[in-house]
Image (spheres, rainbow, N blue to C red):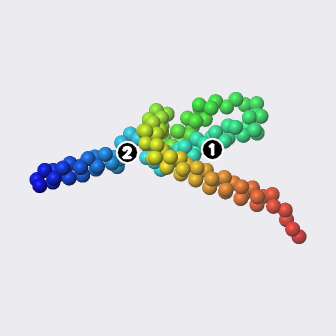
Amino acid sequence: MKYVGYFLMGLILFFFGCSNNNPVPKDIIPEDSLIRIIVDMHLADAILIEPSVQQKQMVINKSKFYNAVLNKHAVTKDKFQESLNYYSDNLEKFDSIYERVIEELTVIQGTLIATDSLKTKPVHK
């Protein structure tokens, strides 16, 4: 009977030890901040591929553009990459982060579409 107790205790410790509830290391960007950074990166991508921007004669240095996004969030390129690597090791966590990124971008898109439709709506007299 004593061995059953040890076995159950060991089994409980095994399951709690294998759970993925480890706190995020302090040098990793917190999820909410990472989401805002990734959203801004995608917005930067959208600006860079905008035809009106591409038609201008100025040369846009993409790496400086992305660095400006990181500087806005007070994050280094290495810390951003390290954080991406950390979260991508847990695909469920990374999927959850990207779902929230997509939600944020969808809200922004909806706001822009609504604003644009208000500007172009014909006035009826």
Q: Return the x and y of residue 96 as percentages of the image width and height.
A: 49, 49
Q: Which amino acid does the dot numbered 2 rest on?
A: Val
Q: Return the x and y of residue 87 as percentages of the image width and height.
A: 44, 41
Query: Relative to 10, is 93 on the left or the right?
Result: right
Toward the viewer: 59 or 99?
Answer: 99
Pointer 2 residue: 24
Proximity of marks 2 and 1: CB atoms separated by less than 8 Å: no
Res 33 seen here? no
The CA span between labels 2 and 1 is: 27 Å
> If you read the primary sequence from the N terminus, does the residue marked by circle 2 or circle 1 appear first?
2
Res 50 seen here? yes
* Secondary structure beneath label 1: helix
Q: Which amino acid does the dot numbered 1 rest on?
A: Leu
Pointer 1 residue: 43
Looking at the image, residue 66 lies above or below residue 17:
above
Query: Relative to 81, is 51 on the left or the right?
Result: right
Which part of the image, by quadrant, shows the N terminus? bottom left
Query: Relative to 76, is 65 on the left or the right?
Result: right
Q: Return the x and y of residue 51 as percentages of the image width and height.
A: 75, 38
Q: To which quarter of the image does residue 67 belong?
A: top right
User: Residue at horizontal 69%, vertical 54%?
Assistant: 112
Mark 2 crowdedness (10 Å alpha carbons): few <14, some 14-19, many ≥20: few
* Secondary structure beneath label 2: loop
User: Residue at horizontal 20%, vertical 48%?
Assistant: 10
Query: Relative to 38, is 3 on the left or the right?
Result: left
